[in-house]
Image: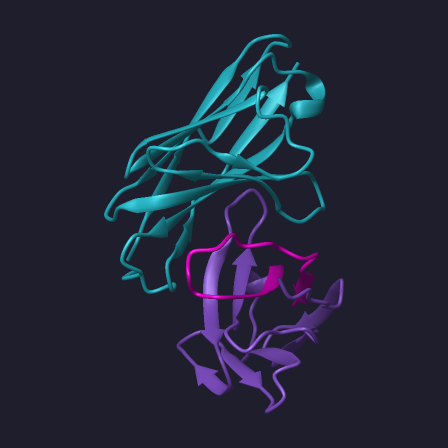
Amino acid sequence: GAVVSQHPSWVICKSGTSVKIECRSLDFQATTMFWYRQFPKQSLMLMATSNEGSKATYEQGVEKDKFLINHASLTLSTLTVTSAHPEDSSFYICSARDLFGAASNYGYTFGSGTRLTVV
Amino acid sequence: LAKTTQPISMDSYEGQEVNITCSHNNIATNDYITWYQQFPSQGPRFIIQGYKTKVTNEVASLFIPADRKSSTLSLPRVSLSDTAVYYCLVGRNQGGKLIFGQGTELSVKP
């Protein structure tokens, strides 16, 4: 089945630094990828939608200059948290949509998530 | 996007059948109903999807009444490893964004 690899699985960084999270579709092409953030005991909150070769679309309230998204190829999207602060500590999850919908889960596959801790 | 309502939490015991109901009164004609499972510190995992009546796969069944304003995820003979959060999502199968509701935290006890 479709597999989405997310890296790293966890990262600790100092306040003020930037962190890049990668999301790769391993066996299918993803025209669209989604980035979510999840705080403890809460649901997933959609941050942005990234389309290959074009600018990402951010949800209301999400700072596009702080959360930089790049979707340069059909198999890779990256989320960079710039000038991270402790309040950015969260669980970040990506999701990729299968270009041809051939995945058994009707087109959406999620990565395993990245636990970001800013100290 | 249709809004969904689920119980916040449910408790069960090993070996029991668990039914989690989701309300989606504003479901549109082209919307499908999809359920995901999420374990702590992991991404959601697809469980089942349906449009109407009943769908069954190797892990669950999904019951959808004729008016499609609700759906019930049925997990047969749960085990401790089924302890997770279950999300009901409603939307079109056309690549649109998935919006998650609060989910149901299922706790299976020995």
- Image location of residue B53, percent across then percent down: 51, 89
Among the chains, which one is cyan?
A
Residue B18 in sight: no
Looking at the image, residue B27 sits to the left or right of residue A29; the answer is right
Q: Nearer the viewer, residue B42 or B29?
A: B29
Q: Which image quarter: residue B75? A: bottom right
Q: How is the image coloured?
A: by chain
Question: Which residue is found at the position 72% from the left and 68% from the top?
Answer: B6
Q: Residue A77, can we see it? A: yes
User: Residue at position x 75%, y 64% from top?
Assistant: B9
- Please indicate whether residue A105 sits to the left or right of residue B50 in the image: left
Rendered residue at 67%/64% (across/down): B106
Is residue A103 shown left or right of residue B86? left
Q: Which residues are magenta?
A: B84-110
**Residue B59's x, y, as percent?**
45, 74
Quadrant occupied by the N terminus of chain B: bottom right
Above or below, B51 relative to A80: below
Query: Which residue appears farthest toward the front when viewing the image?
Result: A54
Which chain shows up in purple?
Answer: B
Q: Position of residue A83 (x, y in %)?
A: 60, 12
Q: How many marks?
A: 0
Q: Is residue A6 above or below residue A118?
A: below
Q: Is residue B46 left or right of residue A24?
A: right
Quadrant of the snapshot with the C terminus of chain B:
bottom right
Query: Where residue B51 sits: x, y (%)?
Result: 49, 80
Q: Identify which residue, B79 or A36, lies in the foreground.
A: A36
